[in-house]
Amino acid sequence: RLISSSPYGRTHVWKRRPPVLPNPVVPKFPQRVIRTDGTSFTHWTTSPRSLIRLTRDTTNNPVWNTGLWADNKAVEDEANTTGRMGRFNKRFEGIGGAGGSVDWM
């Protein structure tokens, strides 16, 4: 009914709405990814490219592999000077205790 006999107007009358279209179908393509060390894996993506060759990944990135740019001594020195343990050791380095004589035990 388009005409209402209610004193409140047409607020309670159902309005005709156009039909809602379904969501579009998103295409999914298989994509083969080849890492720098030669290993590969396949994953599904919206890109139509079927092959990707990586030049940087976790095997040759210095952020992931600190051994590429730092030796073990540099890593140990950084661990001793930064972070919570480094701050603790700096603050209490003059007190001793670690490795000292323990007579009270």
Image (cartoon, helix red, strand yellow):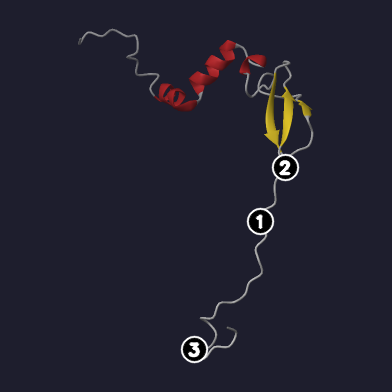
Q: Residue at x 62, y 75 (%)?
A: 16
Front-most of 75 and 67?
A: 67
Q: Is residue 25 above or below residue 29?
A: below
Q: Position of residue 10 (x, y in %)?
A: 55, 85
Residue where numbered disc 2 is placed: 27
Q: Is mark 1 on a helix, strand or loop?
A: loop
Picture residue at 78% right of the left edge, 37% below the top = 48
- Camera-near label (1 vs 3) is 1
Q: Quadrant of the C terminus?
A: top left
Place of residue 7 in the rendered image (x, y in percent of width and height, measured from the top left): 49, 92
Q: Quadrant of residue 52?
A: top right
Query: Tag 3 or tag 1, which sits nearer the N-term?
Result: 3
Q: Which of 19 and 29 is in front in this view?
A: 19
* Residue 29: percent from left, percent from top: 73, 35
Q: In the rendered structure, which amino acid carries the disc numbered 2?
A: Pro
- Mark nearest the camera among 1 and 2 is 1
How many other residues sit within 10 Å of disc 1, few (<14), some (14-19) or many (≥20)? Answer: few
The percent position of residue 24, horizontal first and vertical second, equals 70, 51
Q: Which mark is residue 80?
A: none
What is the distance, in whole Å, between disc 1 and disc 2 at their CAs?
A: 15 Å
Mark 1, residue position: 22
Number of marks in picture: 3
Q: Residues within 10 Å of mark 3 (few under 14, many from 20)?
A: few
Q: Tell me the element at label 3.
A: loop
Which amino acid is tagged 3?
A: Tyr
**Which residue is identified by label 3?**
8
For this orientation, the residue located farthest to the left is 104
At a point 56% along the width and 16% down the height, the residue shown is 75
Residue flagged by tag 1: what amino acid is it?
Answer: Pro
Q: Nearer the viewer, residue 1 or 56?
A: 1
